[in-house]
Amino acid sequence: MTPLFLYNTLTKKKEEFKPLKRGQVGLYTCGPTVYNFAHIGNLRSYLFEDFLVRVLKYNGYKLKRVMNVTDVGHLIGDMDMGEDKMEKGAAREGKSAWDIAEFYLQAFKKDLIALNILEPDIWCKATDNISEQIKMIKTLETKGYTYRTDDGLYFNTSKVKNYNKLSHLPLSELKEGARVEKNAQKKNPTDFALWKFSPLNSKRQMEWASPWGVGFPGWHIECSAMSLKFLGSQLDIHCGGIDHINIHHTNEIAQSEAATGKKFFNYWLHSAFLNITGGKKMAKSADNFLTLQNALVNKGLDPLAFRFAALQVHYRKPMEYNDNSLVQAEAGLKSLYNQFKSLGAIDAGEKVKAFVGAVNQPLKNEFWAAVNDDLNMPQALAIIAAVFKAKLTAADKRATILDFDKVLGLDFLKAGVKAGAELELNILPDSIKDLVLRRQSARVSKEWELADNLRKRIEDSGYLMEDTKDGYRISRK
């Protein structure tokens, strides 16, 4: 087996991945700020993280993945100034901040299903972990890393050695953002808020009592507190977009290592932007963002076309978007599906197990080497083409492609199986298999509402699940 190599932003080089505990991986991925729909630039980052998750599983690692949900504390300014994005979203839509958070979290989860992105093992909301954040801030205060201003409690970055070790930028280039007013009371431009005070003459929708006054946590503290809570000593990999490097992830490292006295995550992986043709990054602040709904679904395009497009560009390279790019991606995806169908589709009612042959080991080794080379998905896709051209039986080609699809997540099975064909659990896409197993567990525990919700998600993904006296039957719709 080829060792897994990943590019570590912290060291600026590709390194062989070695987890803290043999065979196990702790992974923290920065999740959505749920004040609006995720745009396809955001979703490009979540696709990269899904490729990583699938590659880790393909390598046999037992994975514990945590994703945060930012539902408080993320301000519109670059450095802790301006409106809270959740409060702004609530005012925009005439709803409570709590309702806004739940609505857009559910919308985000639907996007994950549409893109065949595996769910994290743990979803953690900032608002569910306020006490953990307050406790961490108290530790930092006791150790002398904090100071108070009129608008909050701040972290003093001048007390941290190598504050810029992730960004690799001179401190003079790490400045406050210019989108909103600056805080004249800050001791250093790079200092950041740990706890923000509520305005004196108005009540926020989301605020809590604290030793420093009524208010809410800063954006950065949530990820430190929750990753330490849920991953503890298994701090292997932390992921996000490159826009998180200079501020958010840099601040996470500073406050976490100040609080614990220990290294905070060994590997830091970041994906590049999705750019609109011309080189401008897609962003909500630039009012140029496209969602999965208006970029694909409303145009009659398969959301998996966006997944296929993301597979064609290495995650550390900018991905270009224009009006024709997704149309071309869908054409390419359909071509692959048609080649898979040409191997012979299974008839309704037959068992898929007989439909699949043996995985070709030499081709698998090539594929494995590609994905283990810092997630080289473009090269992995090229090996799919080699499978179709290889002198193999149709059944062996099917088996090999379905094995590769554990990483690619393009759901080739739906292209090769006719509606009504009964499916074997071990041949299902990992995302569907996980839902099936979770539903069965919920039924055993008599958590009927959860079981019903999981069944709906299975059916929304194109599968039919029927309960029988012997267990269940799952088939293509």
Image: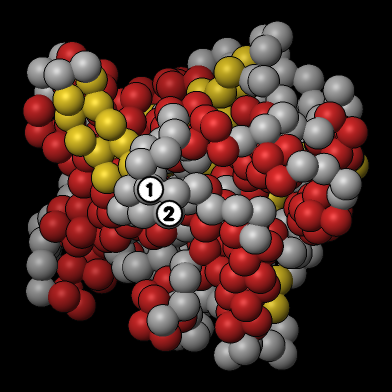
Q: Position of residue 346 (x, y in %)?
A: 50, 48
Q: Earlier in the sequence, mark 1 or mark 2?
A: 1
Specify the farthest residue to the top.
22
Q: Check contact, mark 1 vs mark 2: CB within 8 A.
A: yes
**Which amino acid lies under the numbered mark 1 shown in the image of this protein?**
Ala
Q: Secondary structure at mark 2?
A: loop
Q: Which mark is residue 348?
A: 1
Q: Residue at x 68, y 40 (%)?
A: 395
**Which amino acid lies under the numbered mark 2 shown in the image of this protein?**
Lys
Colour setting: secondary structure
Image quarter of the N terminus:
top right
Q: Is residue 137 left or right of residue 208?
A: right
Picture quadrant of residue 174: bottom right
Q: Provide the residue designation for mark 2.
A: 418
> In this picture, is 420 found above or below 432?
below
Closer to the camera in the image, 315 or 97: 315
Q: Position of residue 28 (x, y in %)?
A: 54, 34
